[in-house]
Image (spheres, rainbow, N blue to C red):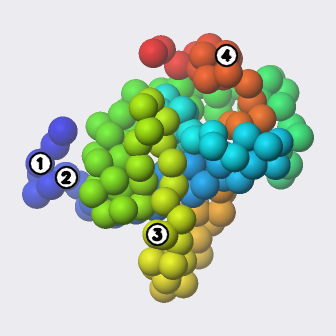
Amino acid sequence: MTEWQDRTIEQRNLLNPAFCAVVLWHVAKGYQTEAATVTDATAALPLELAFVGASFVLRGQTRRHLPVTVRTSLATWIQEHPLERSAVAKGVGILRPYVREALVFGAQHGALSMVGRRVASEPGAAKRINGYLKQSSADVRDCAGQALFVGRWLYKGGTPSTMMAMLGVQA
């Protein structure tokens, strides 16, 4: 991991642990929300999907190509967006250290919790996160909204290993 003072301005702004933790909180929240609709209220986001979710959300072009409904299957989306598929797979590797850092930061600040190999959004953090978003730019709010969608979409996508195989992500 690059020391903070050695990071570029872009890395400090887009990949800082607080912002990435907010993104992961929304991915986990979306996953948990969708799970609750099918009476799986205890389901939390599988750890490997935290990396996939971050890759979908943090790259602007990929975020703009996301479907508008969770009914669009991941397989269909991949077929329609082959370049984005490869960008997501590559992004998982590139973002790995930043996502790890964000998971630790989010857990230390009470926004995320780890239950085994699953990530849960802590409901008590919602007020602080919403306060942060109210004062944020439209791009930051878009990331949060799309992260919520991505979490819901990932829940519908099948098993983590199947989704990662379809995306070409190496474990």
Asked if one can make out residue 80 in the rendered structure from this viewpoint, the answer is: no
Which marked residue is nearer to the observer: mark 3 or mark 4? 3
Q: Are marks 3 and 2 in contact (CB under 8 Å)?
A: no
Give me the C-alpha separation between circle 3 and circle 4.
31 Å
Q: Are marks 1 and 4 in contact (CB under 8 Å)?
A: no
Work out whether residue 102 or residue 142 is closer to the camera in this orientation and state it.
102
Label whose residue precedes the other's in the sequence (3 or 4):
3
Secondary structure state at the residue bearing disc 1: loop
Q: Residue at x 56, y 39 (%)?
A: 45
Which amino acid type is marked by label 1?
Glu
Q: Which residue is mark 2?
A: 7
Label whose residue precedes the other's in the sequence (4 or 2):
2
Name the spot of residue 30 as percent of width and height, x first. 66, 52
Q: Are marks 1 and 2 in contact (CB under 8 Å)?
A: yes
Which marked residue is nearer to the observer: mark 1 or mark 4? 4
Q: Residue at x 49, y 29 (%)?
A: 48
Name the spot of residue 63 as percent of width and height, x first. 64, 50
Which marked residue is nearer to the observer: mark 1 or mark 2? 1
Give the position of the N terminus as an image quadrant.
Answer: top left
Q: Are marks 3 and 4 in contact (CB under 8 Å)?
A: no
Work out whether residue 170 or residue 59 is closer to the camera in this orientation and state it.
170
Q: Is residue 167 above or below residue 151?
A: above
Q: Which residue is mark 1?
A: 3
Label annotation for residue 162: 4
